[in-house]
Amino acid sequence: MNIRFIEGQGADPEQERRNALAKVAAIVALDAQGMPEAIDSVGYRSAGKTLVIGAAGDVLPHADRLAAALPVTVLLTDGADGGQAGERPGLRLYPVSQVRGLVLSGWLGAFHATWQAPGQPPQQERFDLVLDLGATPQIASHQKPHGYYAPGADEAERAAALEAVTDMVGDFEKPKYFAYKERLCAHSRNARTGCNACIEVCSAGAIEGAGNLVKVNPYLCAGCGACSTVCPTGAMTYAYPAPQHTGGRLKALLQAYFEVEGSEPVVLLHSESGGHLLANLPEPVPARVLPVALHHTASTGIEVWLTALAYGASGVTVLMTDDDAPQYTAALDQQMGFAQQVMDGLGYAGPHLQLLRVSSPAELAPALHHAPRGEVPPQRAGYNIALEKRNTLDYALDHLYRHAPQQVPEIPLAPGAPFGALALNRDTCSLCMACVGACPASALQDGQSAPQLRFIEKNCVQCGLCADTCPENAIALVPRLSFSESRKQAVLLNETQPFHCIRCSKPFGTLRMIEGMLARLASHPAFAGNLDRMKMCGDCRVIDMLQPQDEMKVTTLRRE
């Protein structure tokens, strides 16, 4: 890493003092922003009906204690009941069953369990809460649903879970963390799959494909925000807190820091678990490192990080812990790769971004002493983060390019980047316009009254739906970031002559498309004798089909 000096070694003591004062001012300004009220919320209702799962030796003592406060049902998964094999379950004030084939799903107030006891038909029942003391959790998702407790074998953890379960009776609510805009979604078109990023990154199993769109279960959503981070179009937005609120906090933080002549600030984004590590560091956090608490660090991505750099931050550090799902780390690492490619391509000396995954304060302390000191624009940006993700990216990229040490026309990016162009094989493209219908971002457009294919690079999110839909395999993705003015304009990719109906002369297709279709159908027995119909528009084709082939055509002469 390109580190000019380690904190406290070779640093200017006077500047370090100013940084410390600036940090205090920045944190005060950050705290003054507060948190907004949630616009929408998700409600849960629990009557306390609890399902306890696991081996008899683990479950029954805890179930006995829990049954004193809540209605309990016990399902034993080890084929034992605490007595000898084959004996009937001991007498208890709650139902106990030995089961197999247990299937569990749901959330607080709405868990559904299906199981089969020996010699009995399958049973199913609804529960409000689940205490899972089995060796392997019945719900495998990394982020467990509200109301589901799987504390493992540690007795202290089990006692804490038992106490938590007894408190989960009544009405509860949480913010609705996401907003989804169907019109922007690049998940699928015409039974072709394009972007699966939000489905793959969700650690709560809250997102699934639903036809051409995706469906988010608000009861399972844990509010990590990773779906909005990886979404290339902005169809998925982190709604609580909204992007504008996060942007306002960053702007206030850095403005206050610079007003007290602080230097080379690093924005340290952390979630609750990361805050616990920070609070227990064996030494103070370096003065230029500015901690910013988030509900979850996975909720910020490339548009927020580039904005922080445009605001004057020398770097952005994102802190992950062992509590975070591994797919979050992979997604943020990929996003940071794209962002650093942009900064490198524009000539800003780096590095600018740091992704930390640590498990203890002892690991975190030395990592923060190597926080990035990247070069940033000499003039700080004044724009505000917008609700639309792509708009914020445009603001950040325009500012970084305007003040860049090297203003290159384009920057090649790694595959998977949310920016890019298309390579079109004009020789094989028939201008059928299937790609235009598949494009969710209006990057591909037809020529309206003329057989033309046009492309607006600024709109392209590289979802691949166009390439997957193209029947001629004429399209390839070109991941890159262009800064030319033409990226905002509709550029002609291909055109051909229109084909006119041989019966009424109305244009209804392209010459290349009709010629290709005739070549493929010429030897087909169902079409070989009626190829002329393929040269007619839809209306004329119907008329020709309904007209008897042996009908005598009579011409009537009219006397003047």
Image (cartoon, rainbow, N blue to C red):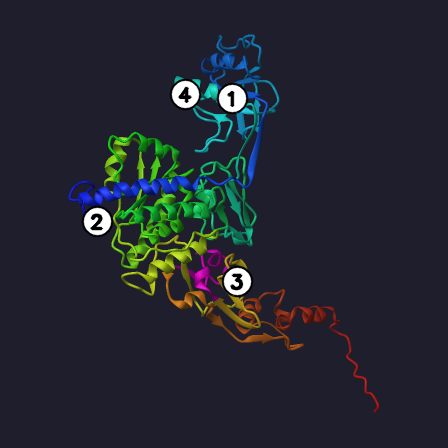
Task: State the SS at label 2.
Answer: loop
Closer to the N terminus: mark 2 or mark 4? 2
Q: Tell me the residue that label 1 is attached to.
A: 167
Disc number at residue 271? none
Q: Is residue 541 left or right of residue 252?
A: right
Instruction: Quickly name the residue at label 2.
Output: 2
Closer mark to the observer between disc 1 and disc 3 = 1
Instruction: Say which quarter of the image contains residue 299.
Output: top left
Front position among marks 3 and 4: 4
Q: Where is 391 relative to 494, above or below?
A: above
User: Does 366 sit above or below residue 115?
Assistant: below
Q: CA distance from mark 1 to mark 3?
A: 54 Å
Q: Amino acid at mark 1?
A: Asp
10 Å neighbourhood of mark 4: few (<14), some, or many (≥20)?
Answer: some
Q: Residue furthest left?
A: 10
Mark 1 lies on a secondary structure that is helix
User: Which is closer to the viewer, label 2 or label 3?
Assistant: 2
Disc 2 + disc 3, Cβ < 8 Å:
no
Residue pointed to by mark 4? 157
Q: Residues within 10 Å of mark 1 (few under 14, many from 20)?
A: few
**Residue count near mark 3 (Cα–Cα under 10 Å), binned few <14, some 14–19, many ≥20:** many
Tag 3: amino acid: Val
Q: Which residues are magenta?
A: 455-479
Residue 457 belongs to magenta span: yes
